Image: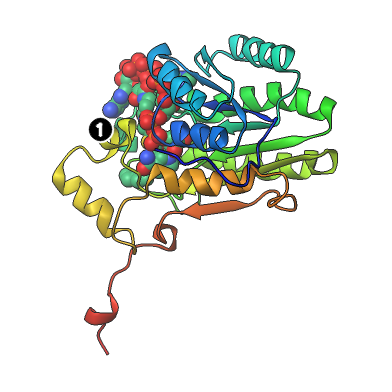
Amino acid sequence: MTEKSPLAEFDGRLAIVTGGGSGIGRAIALRYAAGGGDIVVIGRRPEPLEETARMAERFGVRASVIPCDVRDADALTEAIDGVAAEHGRIDALVNNAAGNFVCPAENLSPGGWRAVVDIVLNGTFYATRAAARHMLASGGGAILNVIASYAWHGHPGTVHSAAAKGGVLAMTRTLASEWGGRGIRVNCISPGPTETEGAGAALWPTDEDRRRVLASVPANRFTTPKEVAESAAFLLDPQRAAYINGAVLSVDGGQWLGKVIYSDSSARS
Ligand SMILES: CCCCCCC/C=C/C(=O)SCCNC(=O)CCNC(=O)[C@H](O)C(C)(C)COP(=O)(O)OP(=O)(O)OC[C@H]1O[C@@H](n2cnc3c(N)ncnc32)[C@H](O)[C@@H]1OP(=O)(O)O
Ligand SMILES: NC(=O)C1=CN([C@@H]2O[C@H](COP(=O)(O)OP(=O)(O)OC[C@H]3O[C@@H](n4cnc5c(N)ncnc54)[C@H](OP(=O)(O)O)[C@@H]3O)[C@@H](O)[C@H]2O)C=CC1
């Protein structure tokens, strides 16, 4: 269970978290609530969103759910406009929703490519555009995009996801420079392999897959959703992260550095 934050850094503020019904998105939404902020979680299935909202309400904040597919630009824009109308503010947007699976590029159908690119890249843009219009009108806010390290170093079997996450990284840097002067900070967080509802089944379904993934992490363990959420809270904090814009924070036990071939004990002289 997430503890109440002694900082109360999000008191009186509001964050929208896409994919807030599970895994990393739920952990980020709950951490924001623990800091005193109201939350709105968006995803396709209402039940897990309701569960997150019930958990968040234990912190005494307002929590609401919007069942919506981030690929539907009109519905998403209408939903985000509705949040601004109801709450009178949007302080933070976390673009966390994603779809993923491992597939050799030569076997990936156009439909499979589109599904992932539409959720990850296009969905991020639709939500960002809608929320930023309100942030620009009110003097600013924080946008946090959840990516993965193969956005810059690549990884076999992930061409759809890596291309989409790479696009989100470019979007982050572009908008950080475009909107930085108008009070919006746009940053990325890059979790390492994290045991979540979606990731385990889609990315390391067998024990052998798990072993290989773990071997790629110098810390030799999975990232926890709480670890990602704590770093996300830092980047969303308008005081502590006030001067951080266009950055990528890796929370992955050093996985982004690349596969370790020889450890100290096995290094050859
Ligand atoms: C390798 C190690 C890396 C470690 C770091 C990991 C970094 C990143 C991690 C994550 O992103 S974890 C998040 C994972 N969570 C999810 O994926 C949850 C949401 N996922 C989904 O909703 C689906 O998986 C989806 C397929 C992305 C979208 O669902 P939707 O219902 O819209 O699609 P479908 O109609 O089922 O399929 C659309 C399209 O995609 C093809 N497809 C689906 N699954 C596969 C597969 N396993 N392999 C190949 N192709 C697949 C499907 O056939 C459809 O294509 P067409 O038939 O229309 O051509
Ligand atoms: N787990 C890991 O190892 C890593 C994860 N990441 C990133 O972290 C983020 C969270 O992943 P994680 O928690 O592991 O995965 P989950 O599968 O647990 O969560 C993904 C969430 O996104 C929502 N979602 C998926 N598609 C859509 C859609 N079309 N519209 C709206 N919501 C959608 C899902 O809800 P619903 O199905 O109800 O729509 C779900 O709540 C993703 O961006 C992922 O790429 C990055 C690096 C590593």
Left or right, 177 with reference to 188: right
> Between 184 and 257, which is closer to the camera in this rendering?
184
Q: Is residue 43 visible?
A: yes
Q: Residue at x 56, y 26 (%)?
A: 60
Left or right, 14 with reference to 135: left
* Dot 1 alpha-carbon crowd within 10 angstroms: few under 14, some 14 to 19, many 20 or more: few
Q: Secondary structure at mark 1?
A: helix
Q: Quadrant of residue 61?
A: top right
Residue 10: x %, y % from top left: 65, 37
| 51 versus 159 height, above or below | above
> Between 22 and 60, which is closer to the camera in this rendering?
60
> Between 203 and 253, which is closer to the camera in this rendering?
253
Display coloring: rainbow
Left or right, 246 with reference to 139: left
| 15 versus 253 height, above or below | above
**Amino acid on which disc 1 is placed:** Ala
Left or right, 153 with reference to 182: left
Question: How many marks can you see?
Answer: 1
Q: Residue at x 58, y 51 (%)?
A: 248
Which corner quadrant holds the C terminus? bottom left
| 50 versus 26 height, above or below | above
Residue 257: x %, y % from top left: 43, 63
Q: Residue at x 59, y 9 (%)?
A: 75
Which corner quadrant holds the N terminus? top left
Q: Quadrant of residue 233?
A: top right
Q: Is residue 112 visible?
A: no
Residue 240: x %, y % from top left: 69, 52
> Which residue is label 1 attached to?
201
Q: Residue at x 49, y 43 (%)?
A: 229
- Which image quarter has ligand 1? top left
